[in-house]
Amino acid sequence: MNLYFTGHGEKYAVEQTLLTLFPQERPVYPDTPPGGDNELELSFSRGKTWCTARATLRREGRTYTRQCRVQTSQLPQDDPVVATRLTRRTLQRAFYLAAVDCLGAEPPWGMLSGVRPVKLPTRALAAGATPAQAEGMLRDQYHVSPLRRHLAVTCAQASRGVQASLAPQEISLYVGIPFCPTRCAYCSFISAAGSANRLIPQYLEALLTEIDAAGAAARQAGKTVRAVYIGGGTPTTLEADQLARLLERVGTAFALAPGTECTVEAGRPDTITREKLLAIRAGGGNRISVNPQTMSDPVLAAIGRSHRAADIRRAYALARAVGGLAINMDLIAGLPGDTPQGFRQTLEEVMALAPENLTVHTLALKKGARLRQEDTPLPTGDQVAAMLDDAWAALEAGGYAPYYLYRQKFMSGALENVGWSRPGYVNQYNICMMEELHTVLSLGAGGVTKFVENGVVRRMANPKYPQEYLRTIDTIRAEKAAWV
């Protein structure tokens, strides 16, 4: 879509709104003047009393015009942060309303285009709003649909509960294992598959030295670890003795808070063995993932998984037999070859297993995913929405409650990913990380540390790829030794 701006330069905010409303379009800033088709003119003018955003959208031979105003006095010249936020919101609202006139329908998340919609109701609740008032804010200011605003407020209440339990000196810890047996067709994460796994022994040795450096710095600063998350990739690509070494080193390098939550993504059932589960439990792990994504064998084959539904059932039964491990299971709505009926059958089968947590993802096709590169046919946005609506109803009826959510670019139907929990099994790390409640120290290739201080988030990233991580481990170790 051709974009023309007058009186402002808010490219990013407008582009995010464009991506939400017209996901197949990409922004273009032409040198030619406006007056054609498939274009947006968006202006912002400042008067003595009112500031006005005006959107003129031309699409398929028709023109849609909307304008929104904000009082000039609400845009203080001595507070550029507030002024910029309100300017962006006013511009986005004008564009949004013109687009809704064009499309004839509103997206489920309304005007919201960010990754963390729960932050808005969380702030409202912290300021003294009731849940009903927080929902009203999402309705009136952002046009969020009834189901999604209820979902966001419920997750905000869970976030507030975890936040109230955090001690000032506590942090969370992420440890990345960027290796998988094979690469799934929807995956865009930085992970090495197949023959690249020969790097694992060398990678593990380097990672242990980073753990030592970061742990020593954390102890010196008086930091304790509230939650540990070992993710990837597929951490259970490691052998049992390697998992044992990794968990033992985390436990000795860092001061762990009493009852530390420790999650290990077992993920792929074709990597789960009794020996690995015993090593996880002995090393302090108390939560794992056994992630089917789907219980349909044809859909598993379509996404490049080497296991089948029977392997998922076997791995789950094995984890239950070992005991002492809360289990999460991930599902993805919108996979190739899936249907609302097929997704419902998957959900029913997984719920019958009674995992403590169940995360329902919406397929997001990032640039590096094979499904996007091959232009594979996928369920429509309406079909994916039906899958999620079914999941919502079934999970609530089955005693699960939503506790965290996030959104991504290029998601089917502009929907969301939601973590559901049985009572008493909320994953604290997921909330702390997604809602940025405190510092999350990230180790390993691809890890991005988030320092959270007085509401300000500062990031420090490790190299993305295992080979680059190994080449620069001395520098990484020095950075971690001084991270506090």
Image (cartoon, rainbow, N blue to C red):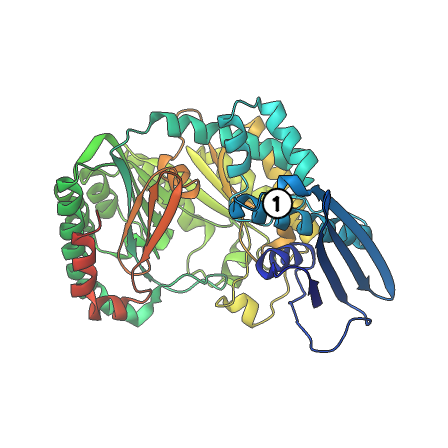
Given the current orientation, which residue lies at the most extreme bottom position? 32
Residue at 45% x, 49% y is 292
Q: Is residue 380 above or below residue 260?
A: below
> Considering the image in quadrants, where does the N terminus appear?
bottom right
Q: Amino acid at mark 1?
A: Leu
In the image, taking residue 399 as reference, residue 356 lies left or right, namely left
> Residue 9's spot in the image, x, y percent?
61, 61
Give x and y (percent) for residue 375.
Answer: 60, 70
Residue located at (57% from left, 72% from top): 374
Q: Nearer the viewer, residue 92 or 102?
A: 92
Is residue 399 something one can see in this rendering? no
Residue 423 vs 240, above or below: the answer is above
Residue 135, image x and y in percent? 63, 29
Residue 425 vertical placement versus 35 (above, below) = above
Circle 1 SS class: helix
Residue at the front extreme, as displayed: 48
**Quick one: 330 or 365, which is closer to the camera?**
365
Q: Residue at x 41, y 37 (%)?
A: 431
Q: Is residue 4 left or right of residue 406?
A: right
x, y percentage for residue 445? 29, 61
**In this figure, which residue is indicated by the disc labeled 1?**
86
